[in-house]
Amino acid sequence: MTRSWTRTLLAVLLPAATMASSLAAAPASEDRGRVLLDATTIDARRPAPVAEGLSSGSFGDGGEYQLVKFAGTVRADQRRRLEAAVERIYTYLPDDTFLVKLKSGVSAPALAAAGVRWQLPYHPAYKLSRRVTGLAGTEALSSAPVVLLVRSYPDANLDSVEQRLADLGLGRPVGRAAGRRFNRLRYVVDQDRALALSQAVAQVPEVFFVDLESRRVLLNDTTVWVGQSGVAGGQATPVHNRGILGQGQVVGVLDTGIDPDMCYFRDTMLGLPAINACDGGTTIDAAQRKVLAVDFLWQSECNGGIDATEWDTHDHGTHVAGTVAGDDLANVGVRDPGDGMAPAAKLVIQDGGVQFDNCADLPGLGCPVVDLNPIFQQAYDQGARIHTNSWGDRENFTPHNIYSAGSEDADEFAWNHKDFLLFFAAGNEGNTAGTVGSPATGKNVVAVGATRRGSSAEQLA
């Protein structure tokens, strides 16, 4: 088993457990009984009861999915013994806990021999995020659409899970994807039905987690000098002054696209850059002075071919691309006042389109898309080693500071591609505590917030 399963989904679960089995003994000094979940902390030594009606069934009806907890840091030999003792290890959860699928007839001594100290049922209650359960305390729920993300186990039959959820009243998903770690199904439902539907979904044994997602929206505001000399640095650019302009770098920009005819991007000799039209392609034109390729992600833009209306008609993406690496055609390779942060760098543009629907401002990241890894991989294969994202979810949606599926995707890709650096906007929700949106909450990404500029600049990212 690879190291990737030891990286965690820190995005799991609701109130705590029924009685836990205590297996292997450990000195009190080494005893770490807590299990950190999404909405609460479980004390494995004295677990609290779960909500009525949201407890696990017997083996074969959800009872085989268990949390197994060690008394301290898990050694490599303990991990190997645990792998041999169970059907499958799905993921790590802090502290020192794994979510596993038990083999039929597995004995407590076999788990204890691996070093397992406590064993707790993985109740349906644990599958509901605090965003979902928070609906219970929300006054005046409406029929406005909200987005539910349902994750099922990777060894579950995704078609069968989808059918079971349809039978529960969710209808057809607006997006689905099989995954190596967990499958994903995305649904748009009425807000006033979301809690009841989620509770029903959580009782499906093959379901791992149910979360309430918010729309992914556009975020951007920045200046060229503050990163080089600070807010009080007199707008000096000492990095540029030393001739460091981004030479040799390729930056991926995922946004609303680009206007390639602008003087900051245009190649008068070669014309338009290479195009990959919704096919995951990695074709580039390395001879282009600025934009190596434009990857279109929204199928509606690709239907019938790419014409003038499919390029950036919103201008947010063009603004972001210019902020990153714009270079005035009249003075190529030299820092001008209107140029971007790295005017000598080149760009790979990933065009997510523009349509303000229930899932996103960027429909290429909206309802049909449930995994960011292939999008990052496309830019990586085209030479990008820096990737900037002036968008985020959770705009006008609380709570902030959550570890979302998007955060998980970004962390997974960064972990597997250690020469790839992801940037995300921190959000437009102000300068107070607890206002960072995801995926900027990822552990392996750079979250970018705003400096003061005008009377409300601290509200921007």
Image: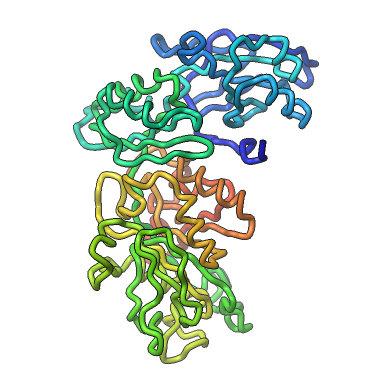
Q: Is residue 150 above or below residue 451?
A: above
Query: Does the image show residue 452?
Result: yes
Where, quadrant-wise, is the C terminus in this rendering?
A: bottom left
The part of the image, by quadrant, that contains residue 105 is: top right
For the point 46% across and 81% down, the residue is 288
Query: Does the image show residue 137?
Result: no
Farthest left residue?
Answer: 143
Where, quadrant-wise, is the N terminus in this rendering?
A: top right
Return the residue nearer the eye: 131 or 260.
Answer: 260
Return the residue nearer the eye: 352 or 85.
Answer: 85
Residue 4, percent from left and from top? 62, 41
For the point 49% across and 8% down, the residue is 58
Q: Is residue 289 left or right of residue 19?
A: left
The mark total stands at 0
Colour scheme employed for the rendering of this structure: rainbow
Residue 399, percent from left and from top? 40, 37
Q: Is residue 72 above or below residue 111?
A: below
Return the residue nearer the eye: 139 or 339.
Answer: 339
For the point 40% across and 29% down, the residue is 210
Q: Is residue 365 above or below residue 129?
A: below
Q: Is residue 356 left or right of residue 53?
A: left
Q: Is residue 97 left or right of residue 389?
A: right
Residue 70, percent from left and from top? 70, 22
Residue 153, percent from left and from top? 48, 29
Return the residue nearer the eye: 181 or 105.
Answer: 105
The part of the image, by quadrant, that contains residue 194 is: top left
Farthest bottom residue?
Answer: 330
For the point 58% across and 31% down, the residue is 91
